[in-house]
Amino acid sequence: MNLRALVLALACLLAPASAAAQGDARAAEVRIKAAFLYKFCDFVEWPTAAFAAPGDAFTVGVVGADALADELAAVVAQRSVHGRPVVVRKLMQGAPLAGLHLLFVGGRDGGRLPEALAAAKGRPTLTVTEAEDGGDPGSVINFVLVADKVRFDVALPPAEAGGLKISARLLAVARKVVAGSS
Amino acid sequence: MGEDRPGWKGRGGWRRTAAGAALLLVAALAQAQSQPRGDLADLSLEELSNIEVTSVSGRAEKLSSAAASIFVISGEDIRRSGATSLPEALRLAPNLQVARVDSARYALSARGFNGTVANKLLVLIDGRTVYTPLFSGVFWDAQDLMLEDVERIEVISGPGATLWGANAVNGVINVITRPTQATQGAQVGGGGGNLERGSAFRHGGALGADGHFRVYGMYFDRENTERADGSAVRDGWHKGQVGFRADWGGAGRGFTLQGDAYAGTLDQSQPGKTSIDGINLLGRWNQRLAGGSDLRLQAYWDRTEREIPGTFGEVLDIFDVEFQHGITPAAAHRVLWGGGYRHGRDRVRNSAALAFLPADKDLDWANVFVQDQIALGATLELTAGLKLESNDYTGWEHLPSLRLAWKPAADKLLWTALSRAVRAPSRLDRELFAPGSPPFTQLAGGPNFRSEISKVFEIGYRAQLSDALSYSITGFYHDHDHLRSLEPAPGGGFALGNLMEGTTQGIEAWGSYQMARSWRLSGGAVFLDQDLKRKPDSLDPTGPSALGNDPEYQWMLRSSHNLAPRQELDIMLRRVGGLPQPSVPAYLAVDLRYGWRARRDLEVSLTVQNLSDSSHPESGAAPARSELARGAFLKLRWTP
């Protein structure tokens, strides 16, 4: 086998492997983010008014991240948040956001963020995004990848506007915290 | 399963810790990909923050398939155990034998040869080797850290000599602390009970654009133990320790600087008090080079001082520098190579009772190693490695190993390994004399002491049967030669020689079962059969019992139960078989911890050790030995 053929053969051998590895990494990222979303709820207090009745479900809306929605649904299937059952809804862009306690907007481009988040502004909805690092996504929590790890930043002003209380422990783990008024 | 995250750390200082990064990745990746959903969601925020999501090199993947008997203690396991010291936390590893001798001393080994001067285990804390060249073992009273900052402890039973070097004959313990990014903010903890009191604080913050740091301090005092007749053993002690760590950079390039300092005072049966002091400083740099290779460099200085009035005094400085380079020269090969140099400056104060001669000694070690992981197909991998290591006493030693891993599916691994491990002479083997001045009627050194050799065969299987159930089982056979013996010296008295030999064989197994979302059961057991004997020409008066005092079996069972969202109940049962010589009865210890998160930022826990008996001995000869009493410890931890 000459050198060229060898290189070609190696390339053929390697290509599927690296693609698979990337796929695995992306799947891992989705799973970790889903786990985070569930964990966040333990460290956030919603105002009583956010729930119409004591037994009401805790409702999560997911926009533009179906895989994550499926993953999260699996995570919360046997779990509760603040003693409430959890419902995960896949939402279309522009769907009404009333009654949502947590809203995740997927995608890194940030193009649809302003619209999705504007509708949640002032509501008791914990907004979570995965926007490009460096900008101001306008959400309460934004996932960022740091050194191949899923980290997150927290912005307190939108949380305060919605009457959400975020525990110090969550803030301690956050990469960055944008302080609020108080 | 939570504690059996496969991971394989590189050897040596930063090899080890360097490998730490790779390892972390491996373990984390393996965890992210193969763990059931529940497990990810059950991790803490901090743990989630530390999972790496991209497989940057095949090496990581390989590491997850580590062909070795490896058990991982997670930081969460440690927290839930209520352990207050490093050796107590190590009881969580089913493949270690941990026997507490008294208030401060432990006998700790894997696969036998246990005793307070056990010498076949290599212990690393963040890449720093903490065994002393004085006797090739660990002074456990000197080695501690803030357990809240421990990310994981990898416990490998069996030889790891090719990567880690001489002394990694029967096992390697790799303590890895959390990166400082994960320990931001403040934490204050404190507690007390009938046997000990302690407190600790830590504070972490940012350091420039891409750096983080933490500082910590801790203090404890521990009570005397008592003998079976109720009389006090003079072994109470207290110790304070401070330290820091700073990390800069990210995946492609990083730098870590860390250090610790401690001072402790121990009561002793003779007049006066033993004092221990130490300080260490370590720097580690890693860089991903063009072409995808990884380079790591680590250097540290480690000073330990010990003053035992009337017996012995020592000031030991270790300077260690190591590098490691990981390359992929061809598609099917992943090569890790490196080298290191270590210098020891030992200054001993001798006494009338014993002497190390010469009292002052400079020691040098050098090593080079290479390891190739060769993919033999989609499911088969061969790892061949060789380390050459030199020491002052026996020159160059060779430490080869061959490991084969077959992974028919992502959740199954069958592996086997052949290794040759060496325990090179320590100062104790060559230079210990008793009494402290001639004529040395008891012990006249070991002028001809050579390296002990172990040839080891291992075979293991581990599998994840379902989301809830996983297990690991390993069989091992060690063929030892030139083990230490005591032989009549030409000038009268005795000298250390190498006329003992024999085999050690056994089985290690553990598993974990998630009974329900909030309840996990895990357990493990070791069966050990030792067949050690004098060689025909040996005149050793004691026989193989001097080599160690080991149980034929031990098992443990742990239950981790979340009683309610903020309440945890952990129960651990440990059964350890009787020790032969000196005779120590078998015992069953029941430890219990109840934890309650009273507020978001406040955790209260009560730990009771030895719930099942008022006291029992774990080591030593009656009637002088210490018994370990029932202990209760109430702890508060505040994370503002």
Image: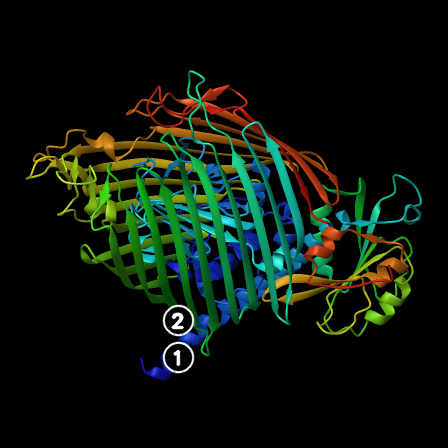
Q: Is residue B418 above or below residue B352?
A: below
Q: In the rendered image, which quarter contains the N terminus of chain B?
A: top right
Q: Are marks 1 and 2 in contact (CB under 8 Å)?
A: no
How many labels, in total? 2
Q: Nearer the viewer, residue A11 or B441?
A: B441
On the image, numbered disc 1 is attached to which residue? Answer: A7
Type of the residue with mark 1 = Val
Residue B303, position as x, y percentages in the image? 39, 55
Chain of the residue displaying label 1: A
Q: Nearer the viewer, residue B305 or A113?
A: B305
Cα distance, mark 1 to mark 2? 15 Å
Q: Nearer the viewer, residue B115 or B272?
A: B272
**Quarter assignment of residue A1:** bottom left
Q: Identify the residue at horizontal 35%, vertical 36% (top origin).
A: B507
On the image, numbered disc 2 is attached to which residue? Answer: B328
Chain of the residue displaying label 2: B
Q: Identify the residue at horizontal 85%, vertical 66% (top origin).
A: A117
Q: Is residue B279 above or below residue B267?
A: below
Q: Identify the residue at horizontal 66%, vertical 46% (top origin).
A: B188
Closer to viewer: mark 1 or mark 2:
2
Inspect this view and state whether residue B236 appears: yes
Residue B184, position as x, y percentages in the image? 65, 57
- Going by the image, does B368 lie left or right of B191? left
